[in-house]
Image (cartoon, rainbow, N blue to C red):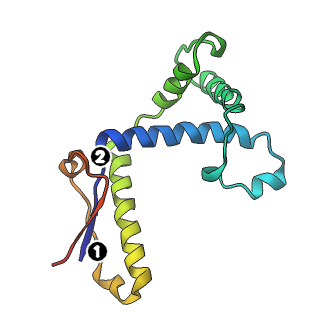
Amino acid sequence: MSIQGHVDMDKDTRAILQNRLLREIRLEKIKDMDEEEKKDTDLQSLKIGKEEYPEYLTRAYKKLKKNTAKKLPRADKISETEMENHLRAQDPVSKDDLQELALDRARSIRAYIVGKDPELGQRIFLRHGSEKDLSEEGKSEAVLSIK
């Protein structure tokens, strides 16, 4: 058996960019926590409330502005949407990122199957996709092939 992951270039690119944006904002919130809270906090599950979002977004944007060679507008001169767009643009999604996402999807399916029946682990292989596989519209999935 072989498993191959697929991605939707548009949807998955947007999702990766959004996750990166939220990560930067969460990192700003963590700075306000004491050491004990930091130890018990999972960055992915850290919630940012609507009332605190603008503050942490602004801090993340100011950090970007400070650490980039590009001339960016001051935070108080632009909207939240513009700050978000600048933060998303700092780290474009590459084909490697999308291929890794596709492979992660295949790994997840493999881990689930092997968890149900460990003996299958030696007979399930991960198949890497080609660039063509990455561009197929609507393919946010993992495909299992039995030969």
Residue 54 numbered mark, or none: none
- Locate residue 5, reporting x and y percent: 30, 60
Residue lying farthest left? Answer: 147
Q: Earlier in the sequence, mark 1 or mark 2?
A: 2
The residue under label 1 is: 125
Tell whether 76 sits left or right of 99.
Answer: right
Give the quarter of the figure containing the C terminus.
bottom left
Q: Amino acid at mark 1?
A: Phe
Above or below, 48 relative to 82: below
Q: Secondary structure at mark 1?
A: strand
Mark 1 to mark 2: distance in Å?
A: 22 Å
Identify the residue at image location x=35%, y=60%.
Answer: 103
Identify the residue at image location x=18%, y=48%.
Answer: 132
Identify the residue at image location x=55%, y=15%.
Answer: 72
Q: Amino acid at mark 2?
A: Asp
Give the quarter of the figure containing the N terminus.
bottom left
Q: Secondary structure at mark 2?
A: loop
Above or below, 110 relative to 116: above
Residue 115 sits in quarter: bottom left
Tell whether 90 sits left or right of 30.
Answer: left
Residue 8 numbered mark, or none: 2
